[in-house]
Every structure is written in C-alpha cells, then in structure tokens.
C-alpha cells in the first residue's frame, strides 16, 4: 500500500521536473484500455457541460470546451489540455456525425381545472405530426406532469390522465398508435422547482418527446 | 412528497436498487437510429447484424466492424454513437422517475464513443456513469467523446 503511494508521488515529481525543464512532452505509448476523454460543445446548442474523469488514483474535472484528459494504466488522469478545434474534428467529427438527430420536445398546457388543452397547445398538434415525419423510425413519448399539490401517488395518476388526453388527440389527428408510448412522471420532474404542495400552473403540463 | 433525489437515496441505503430487468424480461432501453457498415448487437452469447429501427435492451452490447458506425437514442433522450472498431455495453438503463428510479451505466470496452446526455443526467447527474477499462466518467451534461485503446 505504502509503496504504491510512493510510486505515485515519484511519478508526479517526474512530471513536474519534465515540464519545469521545458522538455517536449513525451507521450508514453498507449496500452490496451487507455482512455482519452474530451468534453465537447453540444452539437446542437453549443452548450458546454461538465464531467469528472476518475479512477482509484485520482480525478480530473473537464469543464471547458474541448477540455481533454488521458488515463493510462492505473495512473491518475493526466493533465487537462484543450484540444484545438481542428484536432477535435479530426478525432471525433466522424463519430459525432453518427449521432441520431436531437429529440424534438413539445410542452402542452391545460385550461384551468379542465381536461381541455389551451388553444395555443392544441395548435401544436400538427407540428408534432410533422416532426414525426422527420425522424427515422420515430418514437413518440407522451409524458404527463403535475405540480406538487396533493399526494405523489395521486399525481402520477393525474399526470397519466392528462397524457391520455393528449394521446387521443394525436391518434385522432392520424398518428400511428404503435409508435406512441404514454407515461406519467407525476410531480417528480418539475419544470419550475417548488416546495411540496405548491400550486404552479407551469408544472401542470404534458410533454411530447419525438425522437 | 418524496423528492426524486431523496427516494433514490433511500433505495440506495437499502441496497435494493433493481436493475429494471431480469434475464427473462429485459427492459427496452432505446432504438437504433443510425447504422452504416458492419454493426452487431450482442445479446447473451448471440451476435446479430443490427437493423435500423431495432430496439436495444439493457445489457445489450453494440459492436462495430472496421467500417461500422451506429447511433442510438435511449428512452430518456440520451444519444450515443460508436465509431469504427468499437464496442460498448449498456450495463444499466433504468428510467422510471415516478418510482424514483433512474440510472445509466455505459461500459466502453474499446474504440470511439460519443455521448449526449438526456433526462437521466438532468434528473440525477450521479446516476450516469461512462466506464472504461481504467476510468469512470461522471457526467454533468452534455456532450462527451471517448477513445479507448484496443
């Protein structure tokens, strides 16, 4: 155990000495299982997220565009470097082009204390049908959501009732029922975070995910 | 009300996290949306040629040949693609937020894999793990690319 810790410390010193001397970075030959991880801007929105690369020896945070680290053997993740745009494209451009198209989301709202959609929401139905045509082997998921008023279990049922209303609208408009799945998240997935037992119309909604 | 996070913590404390699937009744996890070249879905001991539109299940392995590429969309809107000469296994996929159960573990055996986070990473970031032979990547959203040397 102690010996293992010493060798990690020694490896760290060696790395410091190398960079202090201004030596060109020597890249050890890659071994099976060696890992390179790069955080990339979201291909659709450009948003850059965050990731933590870790193993038993250490961890590295990635939180800027094209930040990258390598993990070799059981050594801690290497220094975080930033890939150039061209380099990232060479390494991963082809890979990213194999991603399916991003799911398309619609949020529908109901009239107050009613099973009827608002006029604006009902007008979205043709757009949903159009989106379905744009996806290869489309899946349509209709998810009912509630606010936190009332009991959690009752809200799962309430969300499901709302989702069923929307499913019927879609089927009446000509959507193939075999591609539609209906589910409810009850009060577990709030659009606007609130405390329990809080009336919040924006959380009483049905989401349609077309993917 | 039990918040999602609290109920997940409760389940973890009890050590009773169901995987959402048994061998007899695997849970559908997503669908293959992009295929080019040689792509295989390995289920149990059987490797079968992947088809566009095919459903993938928890515990399935995706494998590509030297000219293969594949893209899948999981039920929580997570997207994953594999480049040529790659292999990744969907060790866990649980998406039942109403029951307080969500989890995604993708085991990258070799090659090139891209990951774009979906709802699970939003609802419970700690529930998403990308594993390679020598590292674990925790995700706070959104897009990652990994290369694992064969």
Image (cartoon, rainbow, N blue to C red):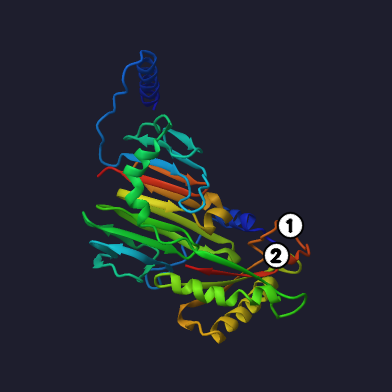
Query: Which residue is labeled 2 in the image?
Result: A203
Mark 2 closeness class: few <14, some 14–19, many ≥20 residues within 10 Å: many
Q: Nearer the viewer, residue B126 or A189?
A: A189
Instruction: Of the two numbered discs 2 and 1 on the same chain, state the one appearing first in sequence.
Output: 1
> What residue lies at 31% left-to-right and 35% top-to-bottom?
A73
Q: Is residue A91 above or below residue A22?
A: below
Residue B108 shows up from this direction: no
Q: Quadrant of the C terminus of chain B?
A: top left
Furthest toward the top, the residue is: A21
Furthest toward the left, the residue is: B66
Instruction: Evaluate if marks 2 and 1 touch, with contact meaning CB atoms under 8 Å apart.
Output: yes
Q: Quadrant of the N terminus of chain B?
A: bottom right
Q: Is residue B66 left or right of residue B119?
A: left
Q: Nearer the viewer, residue A68 or B129?
A: A68
Query: Which residue is labeled 1 in the image?
Result: A194
Pinpoint the chain carrying mark 1.
Answer: A
Q: Quadrant of residue A157?
A: bottom right
* Disc 1 secondary structure class: loop
* x and y, in percent, of residue B147 in the image: 33, 44
* x and y, in percent, of residue A52 in the image: 48, 40
> What residue lies at 66% left-to-right and 58% top-to-bottom?
B3
Q: Is residue A198 above or below residue A57?
A: below
* Disc 2 secondary structure class: helix
Check if mark 2 and mark 1 are on a common chain: yes
* x and y, in percent, of residue A46 in the image: 50, 48
Residue A42 shows up from this direction: yes
* x and y, in percent, of residue A91 in the image: 32, 43
- Total tally of numbered discs in the picture: 2
Of circles 2 and 1, the one toward us is 2
């Amino acid at each position: 155990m102690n010996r293992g810790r010493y060798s990690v410390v020694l490896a760290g010193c060696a790395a410091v000495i190398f960079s202090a001397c201004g030596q060109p970075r020597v890249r050890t030959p890659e071994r099976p299982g060696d890992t390179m991880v790069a955080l990339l801007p979201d291909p659709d929105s450009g948003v850059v997220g965050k990731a933590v690369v870790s193993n038993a020896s250490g961890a590295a945070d990635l939180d800027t565009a094209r930040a990258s680290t390598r993990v070799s053997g059981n050594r801690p993740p290497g220094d975080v470097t930033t890939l150039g745009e061209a380099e990232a494209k060479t390494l991963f451009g082809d890979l990213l082009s194999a991603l399916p198209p991003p799911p398309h989301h619609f949020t529908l709202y109901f009239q107050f204390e009613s099973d009827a959609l608002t006029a604006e929401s009902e007008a979205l139905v043709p757009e949903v049908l159009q989106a379905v045509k744009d996806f290869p082997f489309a899946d349509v998921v209709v998810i009912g959501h509630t606010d936190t008023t009332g009991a959690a279990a009752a809200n799962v049922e309430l969300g499901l009732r709302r989702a069923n209303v929307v499913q019927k609208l879609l089927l009446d408009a000509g959507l193939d029922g075999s591609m539609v799945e209906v589910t409810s998240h009850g009060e577990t997935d709030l659009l606007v975070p609130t405390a329990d037992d809080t009336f919040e119309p924006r959380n009483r909604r049905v989401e349609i995910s077309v993917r | 009300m039990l918040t999602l996070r609290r109920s997940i913590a409760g389940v973890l404390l009890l050590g009773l996290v169901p995987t959402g699937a048994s061998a007899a009744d695997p849970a559908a996890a997503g669908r293959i949306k992009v295929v080019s070249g040689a792509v295989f879905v390995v289920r149990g001991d059987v490797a079968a040629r992947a088809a566009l539109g095919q459903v993938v299940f928890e515990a399935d392995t995706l494998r590509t040949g030297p000219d293969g590429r594949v893209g899948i969309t999981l039920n929580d809107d997570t997207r994953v693609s594999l480049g040529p000469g790659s292999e990744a296994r969907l060790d866990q996929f649980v998406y039942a937020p109403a029951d307080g159960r969500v989890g995604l573990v993708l085991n990258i055996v070799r090659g090139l894999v891209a990951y774009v986070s979906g709802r699970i990473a939003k609802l419970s970031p700690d529930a998403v793990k990308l594993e390679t032979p020598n590292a674990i990547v925790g995700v706070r959203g959104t897009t990652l690319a990994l290369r694992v040397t064969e």
